[in-house]
Image (cartoon, coloured by chain):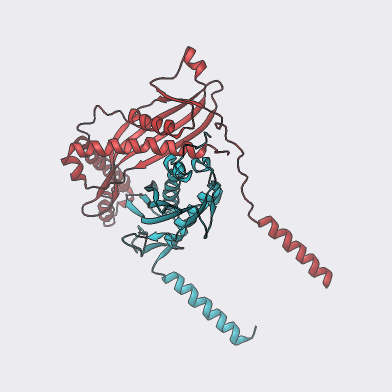
Chain colours: A cyan, B red
Amino acid sequence: MSAPRWRAFVSSALVAMSLAGCSSTVAVDVAYPDANVNRATLASVRPRRVEVRPVADRRPDTTRIGVQPDEKKKPVVTSRPVADIVRDALVTELQRNGHTVVSDHPELVIAADVDEFSFDVVTGRSSAQYVGKAALALAVTDRQSGKTVFARRYVGIKRQTADLEAKHAARDVMDAALARAMHDLATDGELAQAFGGGRSDVQRI
Amino acid sequence: MKRAVAVLLVLVLAALSGCASSAPARQAGRPFDDVRRLTIVVSGESQFAVLAHSAEPGRTFDTLLKWTPYATLLKPIADLVHQAINWLMASDRKTDAAGDLRDVSPPAVVTRAFEETLRASGRFDDVRTAQREPVGEDRRRDDVVVRVTVPAWGLVRVREGDPDLLSAYADVRAEMVALETGTVLWKNDEDVTDTERLPLKSFTADRQLTRQRLVDVLQRAGRRMASELLYARSAGR
């Protein structure tokens, strides 16, 4: 590498480092890990072709999911859009339960709104309590009849005490809150029945 | 030269394959997949508490200690005073908030919701609740019990502000045990928090509201625990 190129490389690296240090937000990688997804009650009905519509983000404040509890009070954001995180979780859960997620000729259409996806921190003397909350409203429509066959709101909340300097507490409570909402959804017998076409052919598993 | 490159390539590939993330081995079946009959046993004591997680007055003490030359010496004493003051304040709040709750049995409310959710799932032939561990003939019939405890419940501060907001909460524990062997087949701890957030004043001023929120969170805890049990149980279509 020639001297001018080296200089350019070093100065770019320095600029990038300083920008990272001055970043006005903190990004956390909230996700619903595929490895932890089980076949649950939703797997007790015949496999369906399901379209999952883009998730609508209806949070009152979409600019952040919380604030860091230190003196800088930097806003905390997710590294991916919240709507994508929730849609991916839904798709993962449906697929693991034996249903096929399609974009054309579906039997069922799922529409979901996220209305809460945030955490609060209550700081104590030597520790902080994190409370993460994920709430989504789900509607299942039968494609052929156009009727909404199921609608319900699922809320997952996780409360956790952590050190004041804990780095991953925000991500951990949001991961757990999302997982709890998804587990409630996957074990919902009425949702499974709606998937099965409302018939009482839900297998005993 | 070509040989060296080839060796290098092989080494790099070997290293990469060692680092490759492999899908975790999924359990084919869980130890309680074939359990069809459940006896839920209510057990343990429940402690009612109002949790504030307050930084004060300790933070003020820390500021004052900065100005004295005896900071190191006085710090442990300040910590104790901080704890004592918060304990006294929590006791007052607890007395105010827990006025009409003597007839509420947290494990009984949780267990009822847990039982109803499991029964509605249709995944068990028989689900029933017992007040104590089965003995004699019952013990022979009930091969598996789920012990449910609610170690703590009450109100917890969930948002700082003016005013602070509190929610009802319940910490619940469940343990599924095979009676014959004593083997723990499944266990789970759930911190359950109500979806409603209200100022402390709302809880202390309206006993009926407080009671309703607390009973609701206990029922929610029972349903949550059932969801986790059902989720942990393999569907195995």
Is residue A163 at all visible to an observer of this figure? no
**B218 w.r.t. A15: above or below:** above
Q: Position of residue A172 (x, y in %)?
A: 44, 51
Q: In this image, B79 relative to A47: left or right?
A: left
Quadrant of the frame with the N terminus of chain A: bottom right
User: Relative to residue A63, is residue B206 drawn left or right?
Assistant: left
Query: Seen from this angle, which residue lies furthest top?
Result: B136
The x and y percentages for residue B36 are 52, 27
Considering every residue shown, the one lying at the far left of the view is B205
Query: What is the x, y in percent for residue A126?
Result: 35, 49
Q: Nearer the viewer, residue A192 or A22?
A: A192
Determine whether A33 is above or below A4 in the image: above
- Residue A46 lies in quadrant: top right
Residue drawn at 21 percent across, 37 percent down: B97
Q: Is residue A121 visible?
A: yes
Which of the two residues, A57 or A146, is positioned nearer the viewer here? A146
Number of dots carrying numbers: 0
Give whichever of A96, B211 is nearer the camera: A96
Residue A148 percent coordinates (x, y):
39, 51
Image quarter for residue B130? Answer: top left
